[in-house]
Amino acid sequence: MTRRNLDRPLTETEFEELDLDPPASGRLGELRAPTLVVVGEHEVPYIREIADRLSRQIRGARRVDLAATAHHLPLEKPEELLTLVDEFLR
């Protein structure tokens, strides 16, 4: 999966980025949907910062840090991730 992503070139025509007004990142506190934030213990710092912000600013968000896991949670710990998501959705 990763190799395929690295092999394909990104072009500016592949997607169009739209600016939201106001930006979504400043409106996390408005979310009312149940939210599960799952992040790997060894994830890169900026992704962990995003998880921190989501779990802090979304009211009632549940945060789970998976031990001995990095960026590819579904590949590294598929059963544990499936159990977390299944329990959350019930």
Image (spheres, helix red, strand yellow):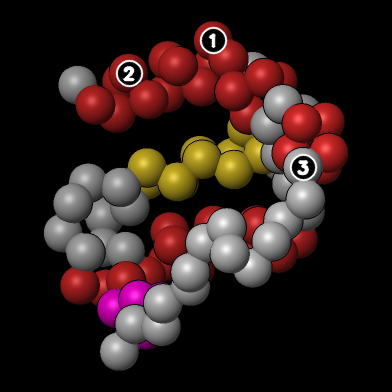
Choose mark 2 or mark 3, whichever is in front.
3
Residue visible at 48% across and 73% down in the picture: 17
Q: Residue furthest left?
A: 32
Q: Amino acid at mark 3?
A: Arg
* Residue assigned mark 1: 79
Task: Say if residue 69 shows up in the picture.
Answer: no
> Range of the magenta residues?
23-27
Residue visible at 37% across and 25% down in the picture: 85
Q: Residues within 10 Å of mark 1 (few under 14, many from 20)?
A: few
Give the CA distance from mark 2 to mark 3: 33 Å
Q: Is residue 11 left or right of residue 29?
A: right
- x then y, percent, for residue 38: 51, 40
* Residue assigned mark 2: 86
Task: Say if residue 13 shows up in the picture.
Answer: yes
- Name the one closer to the observer, 62 or 27: 27
Give the CA distance from mark 1 to mark 3: 30 Å
Give the CA distance from mark 2 to mark 1: 10 Å
Choose mark 1 or mark 3, whichever is in front.
3
* Residue assigned mark 3: 8
Q: On screen, 39 above or below 12? A: above
- Name the one closer to the observer, 86 or 24: 24
- Name the one closer to the observer, 73 or 13: 13
